Image (spheres, helix red, strand yellow):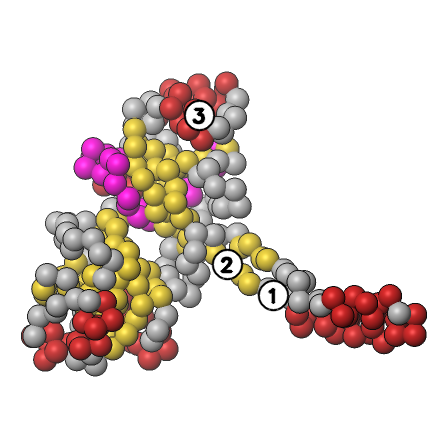
Amino acid sequence: MNNRLSEVRVASYACVRRDDAKTLLNPKGAAIALAFLAMLLPACTTNTTEKVGGSTAKTNVSTEEVADKTNALLGQTVTVRSEVERKVGAHSFTIGDDKLFGSEKILVINASGAPTVLPDDIDLQVTGKVAKLVVADVEREFNLDLEPQLEAEFRDKPVIIAQSIALAPEVGEVTRNPSAFYNKTIAVKGEVEDIVSPTAFRLDEDGLDGVVDNRDLLVLNPKTGQTVQDNQAIVVTGVLRPFVVADIEREYDLNWDLTLQRKLEAEYSQKPVLITQNVYPSAKE
């Protein structure tokens, strides 16, 4: 369950300059140039490891980590999935896991520009920068008018300045009541149960043994370069819609063969399908 998605490594050798190339063409300097390049290329290579979908395992954290490791996370963009504890103001609320005894609640300030709509009984996924609250700084930087009581209650405590907030239902919540989430961006946590094609897989309740039933959510993953593996614990963000195979094929040009089309249509026709925007590892509980 704690497996990580396949990573994409990008290596760039563009920092070899034209002057260095000319040196290679000079017979007198060839030996020196070759030795120089042997050292230069590894040093110039930009090896960046990105988790497909943008966030890395390091930035996908729990509220407990934000509370306990605030200094280490200051200035970093993190993604947190958690229960809403209470609304504090027009642009702020707290999150935290009530199951963790004594866990500190984290203040979230909505700087996304979208209205702050807090759901009942559904977790939220929050992505934003970790900071220590200084109300005047936040108001000035994000053009917000915050409530005066925030200063007294949360000053110098950890806060996430949210740039993105999404509903974070469980797989079963989506499959049992899909109409509540249709045409909305949601962030669903689960385990890859069955990869049915390079562009589609089933997502099951995290930790439950999988059979094709009402817990399974079909996920369409049309982006090239995003790969998953069986039994990986992941979070998928995307838009939920009813599965109509003709519409899906036309819009995404997936080139599914007739056998796969018929199989998926038989199992999922008019059931929900999640069209991915991002896929990334699930934070450890």
Q: Which of 190 and 19 is in front in this view?
A: 19
**Does the stretch in magenta take in 68?**
no
Q: Name the residue under label 1.
A: 46
| Residue interval drawn in magenta | 175-196
Q: Measuring 31% from the left and 68% from the top, which residue is drawn there?
A: 129
Q: Give the image location of residue 111, x and y in percent.
A: 23, 62
Give the residue pinned by disc 3. 249
Q: Which mark is residue 50?
A: 2
Say whether residue 46 is left or right of residue 230. right
Q: Which amino acid does label 3 sit on?
A: Glu
Which secondary structure lies at badge 2?
strand
CA–CA distance in space, label 1 to label 3: 37 Å
Q: Which amino acid does label 1 sit on?
A: Thr
Q: Give above or below for 82 relative to 219.
A: below
Q: Distance between the residues labelled 1 and 2?
A: 12 Å
Splitting the image into 4 quarters, where does residue 30 fall? bottom right
Q: How far apart are marks 2 and 3 (CA)?
A: 29 Å
